[in-house]
């Protein structure tokens, strides 16, 4: 197999980098694959080579190549035809149809370059290149997903578009990361390309910072982690990306546990005898169209995130679940938001949560009133603890919601959620308000 090297006019042998070899295996093993990547990692070439392999060794294959514009889509097809023409003669197929947008081989396999979906196809493989840059992601997915229903494959490949933090591409990636939706996800960082050194990275970083005044575009083009790639633009955000250091953001897989069987209860750290815990609770209405009710359990001393509770729970049921979680975590104290449905939640905790302490807010009443002053105090406390490295976050959605909080409104942007961010902030302020007299004000965060 031969391919053109990036930025070079001559064709050369396609020698796979280690990261490319891993992706090639993933393509064969997973029919639904979403790939979040840094720039210039040769993924378009690799995907086209995989498409050509299918066409040659799986006769009557139909391949649909999508890109943002017609020029990019036809360029993908041109690459496929170019690689085919340079294969050994015994491997090539006679070309029966060839034009700018389509090629057909003698074995019945076809490939088409497209920008918009056609519902009449039954596809063996659909490749959507630079998916996150498309304005019509939802419509495209609705059209192409049925074309692979009879055993086809769908590849979504893209760098992150920082201007769309809640795009369908990012939602699919996040769901795949949490094991939902049937997708397999892959992340490729900037150093997946051989030859990129820390010195190269720092030079590119400084150049981007000098031009734009922030690292948003740089983290979109050359992310080191998927959290960095998926984070929204930071210039107007309450939490600076630089605050989420490796000491603060430590991703963990959920644990299997024998604790309370609570719907939507995800545990990262089991309770330990003698430890103090606090819970932040942000209740919602609990109907299918409302926001999620969300709770966050923190180690009161170290600030380590131990568990999250999220779901369409109405306030009384949510209160019952919080009581179960609080008792499991050594009778944790609870800071509940008092606005709206919070009154019902606090009443349920007071009447049914014997031994479970509901902490007082700024006005010396049970719960936290999120007035303008209250919301500001709440997020000032949470941001101070993040910036000073006094907390440890394990839940990926909590991280991304905190990164999205607008600096002026202290809410998520329109169309996005902040329930887990609010629950985390309530738990963070609960740490301070539940601390016994004489305990240091800034206990060190745990390190794993």
Image (cartoon, rainbow, N blue to C red):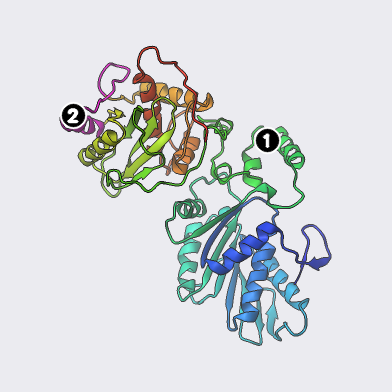
Dividing the picture into quadrants, the one containing residue 17 is bottom right
Q: Which residue is mark 1?
A: 212
Residue 319: horizontal and vertical position, in percent? 23, 36
Residue pictured at 66% horizontal, 32% vertical = 213
> Is residue 311 shown in magenta?
no
Residue 30: horizontal and vertical position, in percent? 52, 66
Q: How many marks?
A: 2
Quarter of the image that includes the N terminus: bottom right
Residue 375: horizontal and vertical position, in percent? 38, 25
Residue pictured at 68% horizontal, 52% vertical = 192
Q: Does 205 appear above or below 187?
A: above
Q: Does 28 appear above or below 321?
A: below
Residue closer to the observer: 441 or 11 = 441
- Mark 1, other Cα within 10 Å: few <14 / some 14–19 / many ≥20: few
- Look at the image and give the residue range highlighted in magenta: 341-366
Work out whether residue 4 can be spotted. Answer: yes
Dividing the picture into quadrants, the one containing residue 278 is top left
**Mark 2–mark 1 distance (CA, rounded to whole Å):** 55 Å
- Mark 2, other Cα within 10 Å: few <14 / some 14–19 / many ≥20: few
As drawn, which residue projects farthest toward the front?
A: 273
As drawn, which residue projects farthest toward the top?
A: 438
Residue 357: horizontal and vertical position, in percent? 25, 25
Q: Does 183 appear above or below 313?
A: below
Residue closer to the observer: 27 or 219 = 27
Upstream in sequence: badge 2 or badge 1: 1
The circle drawn on residue 354 is 2
CB under 8 Å between discs 2 and 1: no
Residue pictured at 72% horizontal, 71% vertical = 78
> Is residue 358 shown in magenta?
yes
Work out whether residue 117 can be spotted. Answer: no
Secondary-structure class at tag 1: helix
């Amino acid at each position: 197999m031969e391919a053109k090297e990036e930025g070079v006019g001559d064709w050369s042998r396609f020698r796979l980098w280690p990261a490319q070899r891993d992706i090639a295996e993933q393509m064969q093993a997973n029919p639904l694959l979403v790939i979040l990547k840094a720039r210039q990692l040769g993924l378009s070439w690799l995907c086209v080579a995989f498409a050509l392999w299918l066409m040659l060794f799986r006769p009557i294959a139909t391949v649909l190549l999508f890109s943002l514009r017609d020029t990019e889509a036809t360029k993908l097809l041109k690459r496929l035809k170019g690689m085919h023409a340079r294969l050994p003669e015994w491997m090539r197929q006679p070309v029966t149809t060839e034009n700018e947008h389509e090629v057909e081989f003698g074995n019945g396999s076809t490939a088409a370059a497209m920008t918009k979906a056609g519902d009449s196809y039954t596809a063996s493989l659909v490749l959507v290149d630079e998916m996150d840059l498309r304005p019509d992601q939802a419509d495209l997915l609705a059209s192409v997903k049925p074309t692979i229903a009879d055993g086809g494959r769908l590849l979504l490949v893209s760098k992150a578009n920082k201007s769309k933090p809640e795009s369908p591409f990012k939602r699919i990636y996040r769901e795949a990361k949490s094991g939902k939706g049937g997708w397999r996800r892959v992340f490729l960082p900037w150093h997946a390309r051989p030859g990129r050194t820390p010195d190269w990275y720092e030079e590119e970083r400084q150049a981007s910072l000098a031009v734009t005044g922030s690292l948003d575009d740089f983290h979109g083009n050359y992310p080191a982690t998927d959290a960095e790639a998926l984070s929204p633009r930071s210039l107007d955000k309450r939490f600076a990306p630089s605050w989420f250091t490796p000491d603060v953001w430590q991703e963990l897989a959920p644990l299997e546990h024998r604790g309370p069987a609570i719907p939507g209860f995800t545990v990262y750290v089991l309770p330990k005898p003698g430890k103090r815990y606090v819970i932040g609770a942000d209740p919602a209405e609990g109907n299918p169209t409302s926001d999620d009710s969300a709770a966050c359990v923190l180690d009161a001393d170290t600030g380590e995130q131990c568990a999250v509770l999220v779901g369409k729970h109405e306030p009384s049921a949510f209160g019952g679940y919080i009581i179960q979680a609080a008792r499991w975590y050594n009778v944790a104290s609870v800071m509940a938001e008092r606005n709206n449905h919070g009154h019902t939640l606090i009443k349920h905790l007071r009447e049914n949560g014997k031994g479970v302490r509901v902490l007082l807010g700024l006005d010396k009443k049970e719960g936290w009133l999120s007035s303008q002053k209250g919301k500001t105090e709440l997020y000032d406390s949470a941001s101070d603890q993040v910036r000073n490295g006094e907390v440890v976050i394990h839940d990926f959605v909590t991280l991304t919601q905190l990164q999205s909080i607008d600096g002026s409104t202290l809410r998520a942007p329109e169309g996005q959620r902040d329930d887990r961010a609010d629950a985390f902030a309530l738990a963070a302020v609960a740490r301070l308000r539940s601390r016994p007299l004489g305990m240091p004000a800034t206990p060190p965060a745990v390190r794993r």
